[in-house]
Image (tube, helix red, strand yellow):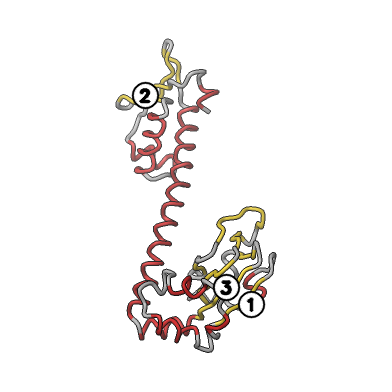
Amino acid sequence: MDKAELKRGEWELITGCALFHGIDESVVAGVLETAGCRLVSLCKGAVVFDAYDYRNCLGLVLSGSVNVTKPSSSRYTMATLGRGSLFGSANLYDDDTAAVTVLTASSNCRIVFFPRELLETIMLETQQVALNYIRFLTGRVRFLNDKIEGLVSVNAEAALKQYLIQNTVTCGEKRIVRLHGSISALAETLNIGRASLYRAFEALRQSGSIKKNGKEIEIITPGGLSDFD
């Protein structure tokens, strides 16, 4: 592509993105002038990898926005990529033709694509680009770990609630659950990690749903198990 194709502010966006942060502008200009680097414009509603076969490329959104959905459902938007967002790392070294996600332009947008071969070349020539890419991937891994942790925590709490509901006995005016084994055994029974189980107990305790004294758990949510459920 030709640098002259860029609109106002797009050059600064490219040089300031995660991949080229701190890289000499002459190096970035050389990358853009490489034959494999392509700038494309998409109309609203266009599916990115249907319109252009850039599966083994890293893309940078220069303008507009792109919705990310699962191939099985276009109704649920997993994420929206805005100006300055990098995408495509999941497919960069994956030769499987099946799409992991579907990217659809949610508005008219402009995207610059960097093919795998070009990225490999500039990473070998400029170590800082390789380090920048590693930092970018590290950030993605951290983000996904946080998302997974959130899902696990919710599932662990739901599993613990169900267990408590099913094992509650009335003792006078109290509703009690007595644990007959270790926390590890309960975690195995519920098919969740022990750390997740501890966090689920703590979440219920902090919400005022339970009091835990050793292996005895008192259900204290006002209204009884119907509210607790």
Q: Residue at x 66, y 72 (%)?
A: 42
Work out whether residue 197 or residue 90 is closer to the camera in this orientation and state it.
90
- In the rendered image, the quadrant that contains the N terminus is bottom right
In the rendered structure, which amino acid carries the disc numbered 1? Tyr
Circle number at residue 211: 2
Q: Residue beneath label 1, please? A: 52
Work out whether residue 10 or residue 46 is closer to the camera in this orientation and state it.
10
Residue closest to the far left: 214
Earlier sequence position, callout 2 versus callout 1: 1
Relative height, residue 156 to residue 53 (above, below):
above
Disc 2 to disc 1, C-alpha distance: 58 Å
Circle number at residue 190: none
Q: Residue beneath label 3, please? A: 111
Of badges 1 and 3, nearer the viewer stands 3
Label 3: few (<14), some (14–19) or many (≥20) C-alpha neighbours in 10 Å: many
Disc 1 to disc 3, C-alpha distance: 11 Å
Percent of width and height locating residue 93: 48, 76
Label 1: few (<14), some (14–19) or many (≥20) C-alpha neighbours in 10 Å: few
At numbered mark 3, what does the secondary structure look like: helix, strand or loop? Answer: strand
In the rendered structure, which amino acid carries the disc numbered 2? Lys
At numbered mark 1, what does the secondary structure look like: helix, strand or loop? Answer: loop
Earlier sequence position, callout 2 versus callout 3: 3
Of badges 2 and 1, nearer the viewer stands 1
Residue closest to the far top: 172
Q: Is residue 134 left or right of residue 46?
A: left
Residue closest to the far bottom: 35
Percent of width and height locating residue 83: 53, 65
Q: Is residue 227 left or right of residue 145?
A: right
Contact between labelled residues 3 and 2, with CB atoms less than 8 Å apart? no
At numbered mark 2, what does the secondary structure look like: helix, strand or loop? Answer: strand
